[in-house]
Amino acid sequence: MTRSALPGLAIATGVLIAGLLLAFTIGRYPVSLAELGHVLFAKISGHRPDASPAVESVILQVRGPRVLAAALVGAALAVAGTAFQGLFRNPLVSPDILGASSGAALGAVIGIFLSLGVLAIQGFAFVGGLLAVAAVYVIGSAVRARDPILVLVLTGVVVGALLGAGVGLVKYLADPYNQLPAMTFWLLGSLAAANASDLLPLFGPVAIGTAVLIALRWRMNVMSLPEEEARSLGVATGPLRVAIVAAATLTTSASVATAGIIGWVGLVVPHLSRSLVGPDFARLLPTAAILGGGYLLLIDTLARTAAEVEIPLGILTAVIGTPFFIWLLASMQRTWS
Amino acid sequence: MVFSRRTFLGTGAAALLAPRIGHAATVTDATGRALPVPQKVARVFPAGPPAAILLYTLAPDLLLGWPRANRPEECAYMLPDVCARPEVGRITGRGNTANLESVLALKPDLILDVGSASATFVSLAERVQEQTGIPYALLDGRFDATAETYRKLGELTARQAEAEKLARYTDNTLKTIMGRIAAIEPSARPRVYYARGPRGLVTGLGGSINVETIEMLAQNVAGANKGGLGNISIEQLLLWNPDVIVTIDQDFAASVRGDGALASLKAVRDGRVHLSPKMPFGWVDFPPSVNRLIGLWWLAKILYADKFPEDIRAQMRDFYAMFYHRTPDDAQIDHVLAGRD
């Protein structure tokens, strides 16, 4: 590792800054740069803003929280994806590999089915994600096998399929006029409803999970080695694996609970980051967080400004992510062996 | 066959038609097919919720069952024994849950579908009729075709007189309401946002069946985008800044006043956020059937209070008595008008 991380980190930061600038200045509601400056300056300095209350509420209550939520969700998914790709030593792994998204989806559709409020639906999704991964981990560890990682991934895939069937069943039973559209919209992923009260429940778990992963950065490098080599270097792989999975699941579940299912970010961004700063987790994790935040900000800005009706985030990220994924498959030998 | 003299003399028009019905009378349904009128209709299978409601209002005794079992709260507004009939699933619409063998086992004389006559549903109607050998009538489910649909259903089920009564009420309601607002330029009508979903950010786009009645009376702020249901952003809602918000979601209606992001909306400041009644069937949106007729009065009143001095309570009582066959008491009327489940 002689390569400097600086140019890569600078590019990632550039993307995030560009994302923030674009996201704050573009939107359905016309806000001039001067008004934006006034309101933000007034917020920081505590003065009365020199803009209409409507503009102030757009910036502080609507666009601001959404921009922050997009950056947080993007960062969370990218960090979780990076951690899982390292842990499973596989470039094709994404944060939902252990069933976090499927569990969250089942929790959310059950919440909608029971006609609960927004907060309860988000709570169900969050808990659903955690429970699903916990179940996968317990089952995966109970199976005695030579390759515990492979068993874990397979268990995740199988349990994910079962939870997917559960989502299908709840949709089938749901009221087709009211609940079914709500479920469909939720599953497509969107930040359209993000508001200030969403930020704390999102920020808390994401910050804790990311902090744990960054604290474990050196050990995560060792975890990328084959199991026997990691053990011979004195790393307790079992407990470390639990910690990594728990931290990554915490960030994934929190972001899925807020934004619904958004695929691809957790798959694409870790690769982009790796090509920018290399595989060392000490550099990779912060870069992935910054780049992920910027990437989802750019996508969300497109989703909310392209038309009067929102384009679901899950659709946009997939449309952009799929060509990248194909390119990745085509060039994998070069980068991973 | 025994003909009662009273029936024969009582309904002149029906009596005149009777010999034709006995032989080869046909009704042209929305698919354009000339459907032979069945000799005897005693059991009708509703293909979906709109058909079940329409049939219940005209001839509750013929209804075999419901696409989904009704909840006890809903049955408080309907004939208890009919309301309690079993769940039979649906053949049409989103999510087909009825098994054709169980449809056959119920021995219906007619399968009734009310809704869209697009190619998908026309071919479905033909296929089910071919497979089961039971006449499958697909009637026009558009709101402004309701009176015509009643008359056709009346012919199919030999309930012409009763159908004519409901059709007249429908015609009169539409004529009265549309007549009173006819002089108002479309651009001068209130700009309405229709809010669905717990955060109120799902809305019916232009031409969607969900906002059919709203678009008859007012301007739909989302109307420029054609389509079904769409998700919009809070910013877009602020930009539209509607005069009136109509919602079916109790959570949204309860939280909208305390929501800082929406406080600057004109409709919120003016206190014009209205929660739609929904018992036993929704007044604005779903199921898209005749239940929206009383909703049209309600919408007209909240949109043009000065032009519609009628007492909505009395109108609701009349409508429920005539269409749902049960007169609600005062407490029930309060409950429904408050938009509660």
Image (cartoon, grey):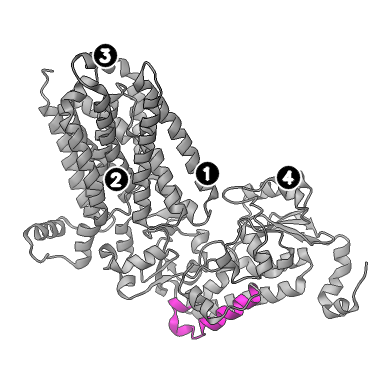
Badge 2 is on which residue? A300
**Mark 2 vs mark 1: which is more N-terminal?**
1
**CA distance separating discs 3 and 4:** 60 Å
**CA distance separating discs 2 and 1:** 30 Å
Viewer-closest of B267 and A97 = A97
Image coordinates of residue A335 in percent, x first then y, are: 26, 18
Q: Is residue B316 magenta?
A: yes
Mark 1 crowdedness (10 Å alpha carbons): few <14, some 14-19, many ≥20? few
Mark 4 crowdedness (10 Å alpha carbons): few <14, some 14-19, many ≥20? few
Label 2 or label 4, whichever lies nearer to me, is: 4
Part of the protein shown in magenta: B301-323
Examine the rendered structure and indicate whether residue B154 appears above or below residue A168.
Answer: below
Badge 3 is on which residue? A228
Please determine if labels 4 and 1 lie on a single subunit: no
Residue B143 image-quadrant placement: bottom right
Q: Amino acid at mark 2?
A: Asp
Badge 4 is on which residue? B101
Label 2 or label 1, whichever lies nearer to me, is: 1
Q: Quadrant of the N terminus of chain A?
A: top left
Tag 1 subunit: A
Badge 1 is on which residue? A169
Residue in the image at 44% along x and 82% along y? B305
Examine the rendered structure and indicate whether residue A232 appears above or below residue A51.
Answer: above
Q: Is residue A290 visible?
A: no
Total residue callouts: 4
Q: Is residue B173 magenta?
A: no
Please determine if labels 3 and 1 lie on a single subunit: yes
Q: Amino acid at mark 3?
A: Glu
Q: Which element is circle 1 on? A: helix
Q: Is residue B106 left or right of residue B339?
A: right
